[in-house]
Image (cartoon, rainbow, N blue to C red):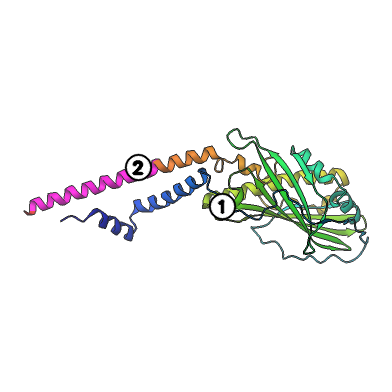
Amino acid sequence: MGIPLAQQLQEELKHGSPHLRVILPAAAAILWTIRKLTGHKEPAKDKPHGKETGKAIDLNFSFKKRGKTPHLPYKPPQEGKRVVLLDMVVQTSIRDFWNDMLSSSSTELVEFHAGMGDRDIYLGSWKEQADGSKTRLLKFVKPLKNPLGPKSANNYQTFTLVDMSPNGCTMTARCTSEGVPFANSFENHLLWVVSQEDADHTRVVITGECNFTSPVFGPLKGTISRESVKGMQAAYQTFHDVLKNKYGEEEEEEQMMSDPLDALSKSTFVSGLANSAQTNPAMLVVILASFIILWRMVMMNTLYTQLLKRLAQQALMSQAS
């Protein structure tokens, strides 16, 4: 007697038949894509969503002009994870740089984003939270150019002052987005270190990384990470030009763009993602259709093989009888 079909499939699954090794990953990918396209949402993350809390404070500290290099309260960036987005020495004192670029009264960051085409820009003042931390909110709308994707994305950056010494400061920035594919699955984290080189020179180092907050399908995860890095590099190359035009730069100290990835467009961390074919909703439909066609072809081949096996078994049984 022939082997029942269910038992045969169990045996094939047990021994890892080649066509099942294709079907199972394809099926998993299709189910994952359907969940995304039908509006399935991950649990809500702790994102700022434009809300400010805390009491406004004045952080226009008077820095000393000379002294020892400040202690940096963080571990060195991990090679291959964090990317150096900016490393330059500008011709100004640490006190003037803070007051010009980072104080509550400064509008330079607003003008920087306006120069990149962002709109509805809001930059709050520094605020002290209940736990003693000092934060500042920046939010803006980034126009997107892809005709098949979203027209714009809402971006939020929450700066947190980690350390301020007489000779420099360290702060982090948590960057999130709304309105682009997989926005709930990743964040970009920045680290700013501003330190005094001498009385009239200040070094500015900014590093960044893409951090995933929920599982993402393998190939798409790589695309999101790469496009995020490209967007950050493009934005801070523009910021480099802004600082150079404003203050001038010590060229021999420049260590710009140490990561080999090139900045392809003037955008922030979400524009490259939203314009990417692999994360665009229309392209996801094409990918889904391709998976379905592949699955049907493999299944038809499987049924055809099973039919031949059954015919052969029946022929052998007829000859034996």
Extreme-top residue of the structure: 147
Q: Is residue 169 among the parts visible in the rendering?
A: yes
* Callout 1 secondary element: loop
| Residue 79 vertical position relative to residue 102 in the rendered view, above or below | below
Callout 1 amino acid: Glu
Which residue is more in the foreground, 309 or 4? 4
Which mark is drawn over residue 111?
none
Image coordinates of residue 176 in percent, x first then y, are: 67, 50
On the image, numbered disc 2 is attached to which residue?
A: 297
C-alpha distance separating marks 2 and 1: 32 Å
Asked whether, in this view, residue 44 is left or right of residue 13, the answer is right
**Range drawn in magenta:** 293-319
Dot 2 and dot 1 residues touching (CB under 8 Å): no
Find residue 63 and report its image quarter. bottom right
Of pointers 2 and 1, the one earlier in the residue sequence: 1
Q: Quadrant of the N terminus?
A: bottom left
Between tags 2 and 1, which lies in front?
A: 1
Q: Is residue 117 left or right of residue 303?
A: right
Please rate how many residues cluster around mark 1, counting C-alpha atoms within 10 Å: few if below 14, some from 14 to 19, many from 20: some
Residue 50 lies in magenta, yes or no?
no
Residue at horizontal 40 percent and vertical 42 percent from the top: 292
Percent position (x, y) of residue 221?
A: 56, 51
Q: Position of residue 122 (x, y in %)?
A: 78, 44
How many marks overall? Answer: 2
Please, is residue 169 above or below residue 119 in the view? below
- Which residue is disc 1 drawn over? 42
Secondary structure beneath disc 2? Answer: helix
The amino acid pointed to by label 2 is Met
> Is most of the magenta stretch helix, strand or loop?
helix
